[in-house]
Image: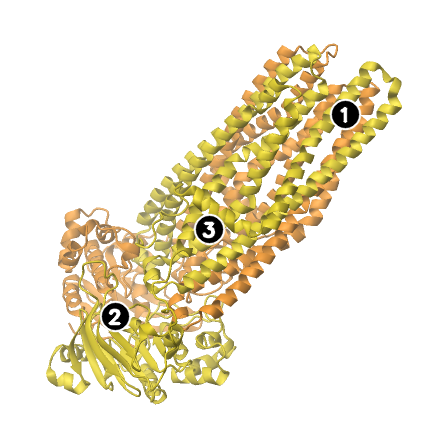
Amino acid sequence: MTSPLLSSRPLRELDLRGAPRILGRVLRLAWRYRRRFVLATVTSLLATVFNLAMPRLLGWSVDQVHALLREGAMNYNAAMLELTGIAVLLVTTAALRGLMQMISGFQGEYIGQSVGRDLRTAFFEKLQRLSFEFHDSVHSGDLITRGMLDLEGVRGFIETGLQRFLSLILLIVIGTSLLISRDPLLTLLAMSFVPLVAWHATRMSLLLRITWTRLQERMSVLTRVMEESLQGMRVVRAFAAKPHEMAKFDTAANRALALSNDRISIRSSSMAVITLAYYLSMALVLWFGGHRVLDGRLTIGQLTEFLTLMTLLQAPVRQIGMIVNSSARAISSGRRLFEILDLEPAIQDKPGAPDLVLGKGVLRFESVSFAYHPEVDAPPTLEDISFCVGPGQTLGIVGPSGAGKSSIALLIPRFYDVTGGRITLDGQDIRNVTLQSLRGAVGLIQQDVFLFDDGIDSNIGYADPQAEQHELVDAAMTAQIHDFVASLPLRYRTQVGERGVSLSGGQRQRLSIARGMVPDPAILVFDDATSAVDAATEHQVRHALRAATRSQATIIISHRLGSLMHADEIIVLDRGRIIERGTHASLLADGGFYAALYQAQSQGIPLPERIGQKERVGP
Amino acid sequence: MSMMDFGGRGGPHHGGAGSQGERGEDIFAPFDANAFGRITEFAKPYRLVFVGAIAAVLAFVAAQLGIPYVIRAAVDSAVGKPGSTPLATVFVVFLTLIILNAVVQYLQEVTSARLAQRIIFDMRRAMFSHLQEVSLSFLDKTHVGRIMSRLQGDVNALQEFFENSITATGDLVLLIGIIGVLIMLEWRLALLTLIVLPTLIAIRAAWLPQAKEKFRRARDASSIVNGALAENIGGLRVVQGSRRESVNLDDFKAKANDNFRAAVAAAWTSQIMVPTVDVLTGIAMAVIVLVGGRFVLKEDMDLGVMVAFIFYVQRFFDPIRTLSMQYTMLQRAMAASHRILEVLDVPVAIRDRPDAVALDVMEPAVEFRGVTFGYNPGEPVLKNLSFKVPPRQVVALVGQTGSGKTSIAALTHRFYDVWDGQVLVGGQDVRDVTLASLGRNIAMVLQEPFLFTGTPLENIRYSSDWASRDDVIRAAKNVRAHEFIMNLPQGYDTELAERGQNLSIGQRQLLSFARALLANPQILILDEATASIDSFLEAEIQEALRVLLAGRTSIVIAHRLATTLM
């Protein structure tokens, strides 16, 4: 699903819109650690200086030796002394260079990691506050990608891209200025490969970047083919469709392989050209430099210095490709991150909103209408819905899929705002009180159960981490899940999820009911919350719930009419409107939609036990 | 046994972090010749390419070694050393050499990278193909995500290894070459300079285990923090409903801080190697200046040799670093290989007998004769069951959950083999006929309709490759699916979002009815095919069923009697 709220195109495409602004913002994030930043830069500068001192020392030593050689060995001892001095300097310089590089590299990573942590926390905090409207419009996979890969993109740029860029510039500037006075032409020749390589490396890395996006798309097709085949293995087997699946695999794999091979060609040919350019300038330096040495205009040590400097420059200049790539990635990743960070939640507390003052707990819908996308010209999801539930009362809601039942449930904790009418709790419009106090008063239990990778106790006590053990047990008992939990070796400390016990759909729903009971909310909303629970257990759950919720207002949304029979009022919803309302008995007597539905359902005579539980082949 | 190593059965799954290297799985393993041998089998078909790649690598190394040698000649010629080659000749040789160098560099990279790609795709294909045949009980027990991480993450780890192992061979040869050249040039100086090598290797060997531990911790911390993010995104509605925002933020901050600390510790560990290598480089240089200078002064050695030494020594350290990285990669590749081989070693329980014949279905009857079957040893689900479905009759199977109804369906299709007794289709034991012919003659509609990404057309046609568009439309019309398909934006060519999530479950089931109808099987099994459809749609489904069942031998499994009362 594409989001109307988010503009940016998929992952890591080459997209340089607003580059200066985004990079500026990334740099400001790093500037928070300016002392380390300055330290990193200074040490990087020193590392460059020491790095450049190496060729000079080596050149000097060659010259010394050469000079002595020509003059004869008369000054042998003095010469050895001098060479010893150079040797000591070489070791010292190398050590200092390494030390400076270490410090600047470490500081770079430190800043990168710090910014990573800051961004990660800010992103997490923002996602938690953004409303359902936003989360409906984005794929959760997209958000996870932003929080993981895009974050790494920005961090990587600060950590290495920035550092490399700085030290490369320093190396070229200082290196050139050291050599230029010695021999301008030779300096020019020695540096001639830099622009060529820079251009080539940039071109290559941009090309690779674009094709990378395409390759990812093709790989994701391949992934999907494999994943679907595994998930739908029973269908595949039932149709003996292995050849068909293999053909799908081969098509997808060959497409990916072809592009991948293209990328290899791009990379290898560019690398070869880059190497060639480098050695060509070296050839020129050798040719002209050699002649100058022959002419006596240059010493052999100075020529060595030129050549050594070129070897020093080679690696950083090649890294221009990486720097370009890292910046391009930082731009697109930064855009995708900042886009989220800059969103404001659609639903938030009004300035100075007071807490909800809970009285008896009377929930009232006053001709509520609602649409998920009011800007689109389509029939609203809910229209003119009015009802009232008080303490100890139960309201039942039925209707076909898509009638708007769940929307009613989602409006009560203000996950969305009504587009017309109002909802009040004990006389207070829910838009005028704080979300914290409102949501504390409403317990919504949904059909789809999300459990956290944590203990059963933490899952049941999720809404109230301070809850006592006995409260958790009471809730579990009401939800008829206690016996099951008690039968597990680790009981309430059993882990849920991949590393723990695997639960059936019905067990998950019962855990979710227990979770909803713990904070003891004034209003309880069950949205098809027992659809996967077998009929007998559901009956027990209902029974226990009736006892436990004597003082609460309860709303039950269900497909199974049997579970609504005891409701004080039942409303029948169709296409967002209330078409019938009354008690079970009065609705049956009316002989309308509800009565027809009841008829249809009782024909599908359920077996005495375990209706609706999914059965799996195999253990 | 290997099946057990996969761990967890298909339990609930909250959008995991999706990163490679799941927590709790070893990412390094020691070298294992057997596993290595089996993995390298995949390279066998490309023996010639492999030899070519190695040849290109060797040529590249030779060119790399030659370049400083020519520089030495240039220096000798520039200082006017008697008997040295003229500068112009040196220049031409140098030009030839660097062009050659570029060409072989290209060849080396292209061949090794492409070869690695090819092998990796072959490997993935072999795994995928094998998974098409492994026993369903394995797939029932194993999380699809886990298998996918083997097909993706582990295979990628191997790709990295393969791609680098050819260049690593080059590095090794280069290192040996440099040492050889240095000894040739001036063996005493060479030996003195080379002292730094064992020192470096020793230091790295001491450093590596700790570094690995630090990196592992950093990776774990990162997957914890990313897992927490993913989980919170998945459970966001619960988080907001339970007002857990601030508690979760505090938790997350703690995890982000742990991650930060672990990452900084790892950064420190890797940076500490930088000055070590630099000091050793410095020492090697100092030796050249001091000892080499002395040799030159004593006229034991040419000045050009001293310069060449300076150039060679700078190339020492890169190969050592990449080689030790390659060692780490090898260990990671070994761990990945083990997991890949685990998949390839999952036994294929059901396969055609060598003498299997195509199923002959003149009389499409289905018969169970004294069948005993179960999933776990000692726990039979069906005990000595016998019954017969006469040709072109509908038989309903009703029973409670766990009574083995679904097993009957699975056995008819030979998804599993019976422990005892016989399953006969058209009078032939299902074990004596080919699986492909069983598949052609028996269709199955399952409780959960499964659609593939693609259009309704592709989904209905599925493996009935022969079917024309008209055939597909006819099938859809017959099961009352035509109308809603035509209401989709592009009709039969509408791309279904995420496997049909935008269709209702009833509509998806109608598509799978059409798929079964198009396949035109003699025998049809409906396994709870209407169980997850709510009653509002059921009338249409009943009508579709009537069409589907007409004239076929059918087994209808249900626990709602309405389905069977038709």
Q: Is residue B548 visible?
A: yes
As drawn, is A454 to the left or to the right of A378? right
What type is the residue that disc 1 sits on? Answer: Ser
In the picture of the structure, the residue carrying the numbered disc 1 is: A61
Q: Residues within 10 Å of mark 3 (few under 14, many from 20)?
A: some
Residue furthest front in the image: A352
Tell me the yellow chain: A
As drawn, is B85 to the left or to the right of A554? right
Gap in angstroms between the C-alphas marked 3 and 2: 41 Å
Q: Position of residue A387 (x, y in %)?
A: 22, 80
Q: Quadrant of residue B182?
A: top right
Residue drawn at point x = 55 percent, y = 48 percent: B333
- Asked whether the residues under the numbered discs 2 and 1 touch, taking CB atoms below 8 Å apart as contact, a structural biologist would say no
Same chain, marks 3 and 2?
no
Residue mark closest to the camera, 2 vs 1? 1
In the picture of the structure, the residue carrying the numbered disc 3 is: A149
Label 2 element class: loop
Label 3 element class: helix
As drawn, is A328 to the left or to the right of A238? right
